Image: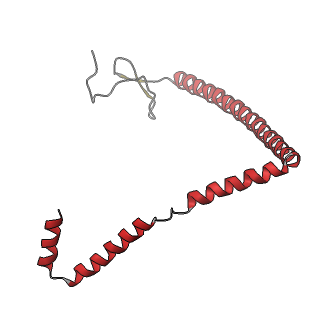
Amino acid sequence: MAAKIGEKVPLAVVGKDGTKVGDDGQENMMTNEERQTAIQHLNEQLKALREQVETLSGSLAKMGNKAGRAVAHSAGTATDTVTTTVRTYPFYAVLAASAAAFVLGRLSVAPAQSAPDRAYDQLRHRLRDLASHLPPNVVDSIRSSIR
């Protein structure tokens, strides 16, 4: 018989009270020998899992150590290469550093406004000041005629 949604499905689980639920859904009392066998089987599985975890931990530690050494070696090699290049070509090194500083400086500074943009901003600011002194109906009339 197929199980319905929400219905408990028997999985032959051993309960705390020593009962065993079989495939047919009936509870049967476990014998002492069955309990000992089940406990021994679970202990063997736990032991195997512990050994696997220890093996994986050791492998991960070795891999991490190797990766750390590889990164340190690569960083040292890169440092040596840069140092040698700078000593060989000092003018180009200064030129490259200056170019990088110039580009970063230009990216971090806001672009300067052109003369027409400044004039437009000043006109807009002056018109807002004037509009604050005019009656609201005049301001609305001017806005509607501009649109």
Which residue is situated farthest in the top direction here?
1
Find residue 24 and report its horizontal and vertical position in percent: 34, 17
Label tally: 0
- In the shown orientation, is residue 136 left or right of residue 102? left
Residue under the image location 57 percent in, 22 percent down? 37
Q: Quadrant of residue 106?
A: bottom right
Coloring applied to the structure: secondary structure
Q: Nearer the viewer, residue 70 or 36?
A: 70
Q: Quadrant of residue 62?
A: top right
Q: Nearer the viewer, residue 11 or 30?
A: 11
- In the shown orientation, is residue 75 left or right of residue 130? right
Q: Quadrant of residue 116?
A: bottom left
Q: Quadrant of the C terminus?
A: bottom left
Residue under the image location 55 percent in, 63 percent down? 109
Find residue 59 and report its horizontal and vertical position in percent: 73, 31
Which residue is situated farthest in the front direction here?
115
Which residue is situated farthest in the bottom direction here?
133
Is 2 placed above or below 43 here? above
Find residue 25 and report its horizontal and vertical position in percent: 34, 21
Residue under the image location 69 percent in, 29 percent down? 51
Find residue 88 and report its horizontal and vertical position in percent: 88, 45
Is 139 placed above or below 73 here? below
Q: Nearer the viewer, residue 82 or 29?
A: 82
Q: Quadrant of the N terminus?
A: top left
